[in-house]
Image (spheres, grey):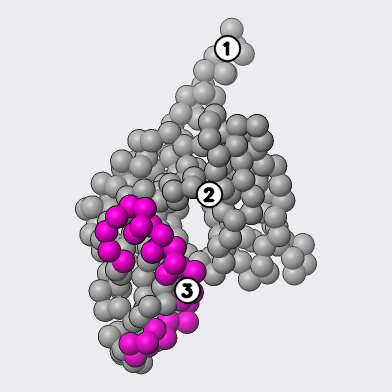
Amino acid sequence: MRLFVLVIVAAALRAAEPVPVVAELFTSEGCSSCPPADRLLQELDRTQPVAGARVIVLSEHVDYWNQLGWRDSFSLPQFSRRQEQYARVLGGDVYTPEMVIDGREPVLGSDAAAVRKAILRAAGRAKAPVRIVRVGREGADAAVAVSIPPLAKGHADVWLATADESDRSSVNRGENSGRTLTHVAVVRRMAKVGSVGKSEGMEKTLNLPPEAQRVIVFLADSGGTILGADEARVP
């Protein structure tokens, strides 16, 4: 009887765990409309305001603003391409600030009400279990151990992103000239590191760049929809 009760309690605790929801902000320091969205992303990360959701934030700086007076030192062409891919799959224009929730719902990145509603909808969907089992350093080297069981159906790619904890810039040209901008979870690297399907999951230790401060692992299908995710701080 005692064992049965413990099993029921454990199942209830698992069911009560917040659902991971990935919020990707496409932003630029050259865009005067972006600082409110940057602040909203920081608020989502810090306060976790949506009941039932564990919001995993990613700040992805695009490069198409760089020729307009200020070169964003955090920008990468990879993120401009990623945003363009979302636009092709989901429909709509490429613009900043745009937030994409779980790779399936684009919203204006500074619209707090719309963002929270999209996160709430995403938290209502079942997710594939993705677990960061361990993350640590040994000298200058850092690594993360990832555990993902086989999927119930279909196939998905495993993505690994590393990000800064926070960043700060003093902008002296362009639309934000004279402003000091702050950011959270600025992605420095993002790459596919494997795949999972019905017949095979992933149990793997992956090397991280020594400067990594956050690590995010997520599953995405061929259309970019995020099926599951986890994150951890790198000590």
The residue lying at 68 percent from left, 69 percent from top is: 210
Q: Quick one: label 3, few (<14), some, or many (20+) residues within 10 Å?
A: few
Q: Which residues are magenta?
A: 66-94
The disc, 3 or 1, on the residue closer to the chain's N-terminal end is: 1
- The image's mark for residue 4 is 1
- The image's mark for residue 77 is 3
The residue lying at 70 percent from left, 55 percent from top is: 206
- The spot of residue 92 in percent (x, y) is 27, 59
**Left or right of 99 in this view: 76:** right
The disc, 1 or 2, on the residue closer to the chain's N-terminal end is: 1
The number of callouts visible is 3
Residue 225, compared with residue 7, is above or below; it is: below
Q: Which residue is mark 2?
A: 218
C-beta proximity under 8 Å, tags 1 and 2: no
> Taking the image as drawn, is residue 227 in sight?
yes
Residue 224 is a magenta residue: no
Quadrant position of the N terminus in the picture: top right
- The spot of residue 11 in percent (x, y) is 51, 23
* Residue found at the very far top of the displayed protein: 1
